[in-house]
Amino acid sequence: MNLICAELPGTEKVAGSGDRDVWTLAHKPFARLGKTIEVLDHGSWSTVTPLSDHDLRERIVAAYEDVRRSLPGDVQVTLDRTSG
């Protein structure tokens, strides 16, 4: 999951509580990795059951895109110029 998140433009991994990694976009979290994987799904956290790599990527990208769409347009433009 960390590799998937790192490849998305403008993302940052920050330490969460306990042994959890939190992935953010413009300081807004969209994915959490610890003993379980959680993604933001329409404003609430959803635990991801074991999935294929392809399906996991789709869930993470969907969460990322939801957060990205919520950002102001000028912030979205700057994300296109950054790498994950």
Image (cartoon, grey):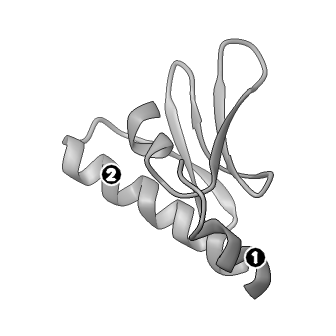
Residue 67 seen in the figure: no
- Where residue 53 appears, as percent x and y from the top left, is 22, 42
Front in this rendered view, residue 38 or 67: 67
Label 2 environment density (alpha carbons within 10 Å; few <14, some 14–19, many ≥20) = some
Label 1 environment density (alpha carbons within 10 Å; few <14, some 14–19, many ≥20) = some
Q: Is residue 54 left or right of residue 8?
A: left
The residue tagged 2 is: 57
Q: Disc 1 and disc 2: Cα gap in Å?
A: 21 Å
Residue with the most extreme top position: 19
- Where residue 9 appears, as percent x and y from the top left, is 54, 58
- The part of the image, by quadrant, that contains residue 33 is top right
Q: In front: mark 1 or mark 2?
A: 1
Disc 1 is placed on an element classified as loop
Disc 2 is placed on an element classified as helix
Residue with the most extreme front position: 81
Q: Earlier in the sequence, mark 1 or mark 2?
A: 2
Residue occupying image coordinates x 43% and y 60%? 61
Amino acid marked by disc 1: Leu
The residue tagged 1 is: 71
- Where residue 19 appears, as percent x and y from the top left, is 66, 13
Q: Is residue 79 left or right of residue 52?
A: right
Residue 81 seen in the figure: yes
Q: In the picture shown, does residue 23 fall above or below 58?
A: above
Amino acid marked by disc 2: Arg
Q: Is residue 68 left or right of residue 39?
A: right
Front in this rendered view, residue 65 or 42: 65
Q: Quadrant of the N terminus?
A: top left
